[in-house]
Image (cartoon, rainbow, N blue to C red):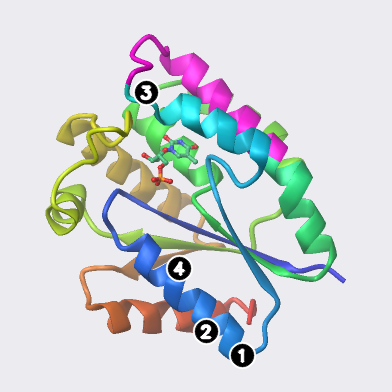
Amino acid sequence: MQGKFITIEGCEGVGKSTQLALLKEYFENNGIDAIFTREPGGTDVAEKIRSIILDANNKALTPVTELLLYAAARRQHTEEKIIKALSEGKVVVCDRYADSTVAYQGYARNLDKQLIGELNRIAMADVNIDLTLFLDLPPELGFARKGGADKNDRLENEKLDFHKRVYEGYLAVAENNKDRVVRIDSSKDVDGVFAQIVDAMKKAGVV
Ligand code: TMP
């Protein structure tokens, strides 16, 4: 029995947390056995790596080190938690996953995309993503919604240009992976966004 793996992606402030809360309720109401997890993080070890990556005091962290830390956290999380849950037939919903590395480290930090592809391949440990929900909202609107960047978060504190490149990265990921990435128009109200998510899950056969 193999479960389904759903990832949720997008720029800062696109409303992922709100939609994840609705999704949790939806699975509960429909008796679907699901776990919710996040990257970087999701297990004790990977959460420790997360705190190193996001700590705004870690100004010395170089871009390649950052990339390797995301990859390390992902491999740990995938092996320890995701594969296990999928093998138990659960739906696994992950707040950010491999596409975040392509968008943030590939497009925004401008690191070698082939290297990122290879690291993602290793970090994913042969796991297959069944559906990626790309919450599409340009970063200007996302930051306006959340009332600015979190000063304690190293990544959020990057300049707007950085986040615009992240957005471009996501558009490219969506274009290049039409079989699994569904663009969700996140300029709509909360219910309007959630309706698109349910529709995408049904079409992809994950619920
Ligand atoms: P978040 O969980 O609050 O979204 O914070 C995670 C931050 O890390 C966010 O700014 C996106 C960034 N990130 C990457 O740069 N690369 C990655 O591979 C992942 C998973 C997240």
Residue flagged by tag 4: what amino acid is it?
Leu
Nearest the camera: 77 or 185? 77
Q: Earlier in the sequence, mark 2 or mark 4?
A: 4
Find out if the beta carbon at label 1 lies less than 8 Å from the nearest ligand 1 atom.
no
Q: Is mark 3 within 8 Å of ligand 1?
A: no
Q: Judging from the image, what secondary structure is the residue with disc 1 in? A: loop
Q: CA distance from mark 1 to mark 3?
A: 42 Å
Label 4 crowd bin: few (<14), some (14–19), many (20+), radius 10 Å: some
Amino acid found under the numbered disc labelled 3: Asn
The mark that comes first in sequence, 1 or 3, is 1
Does residue 39 show up magenta in the picture? no
For label 3, the SS is loop
- Secondary element at tag 2: helix
What amino acid is at disc 2? Tyr
Residue at x-position 71% and y-position 45%: 78
Determine which residue is flagged by label 4.
Answer: 20
Residue nearest the viewer, comparing 171 with 8: 8
Q: Which residue is mark 2?
A: 26
Indicate which disc residue 95 carries: none
Residue tagged 3: 110
Name the N-terminal-most of marks 1 and 4.
4
Q: Residue under label 1, please give it.
A: 30
Query: Which residue: 26% across, 54% down?
Result: 13
- Above-or-below relation of 183 to 101: below
- For the record, the magenta segment spans 57-76
Q: CA distance from mark 1 to mark 4?
A: 15 Å
Q: Is residue 55 above or below residue 104?
A: above
State if disc 1 and disc 2 touch (CB < 8 Å): yes
Main SS class of the magenta portion in the image? helix
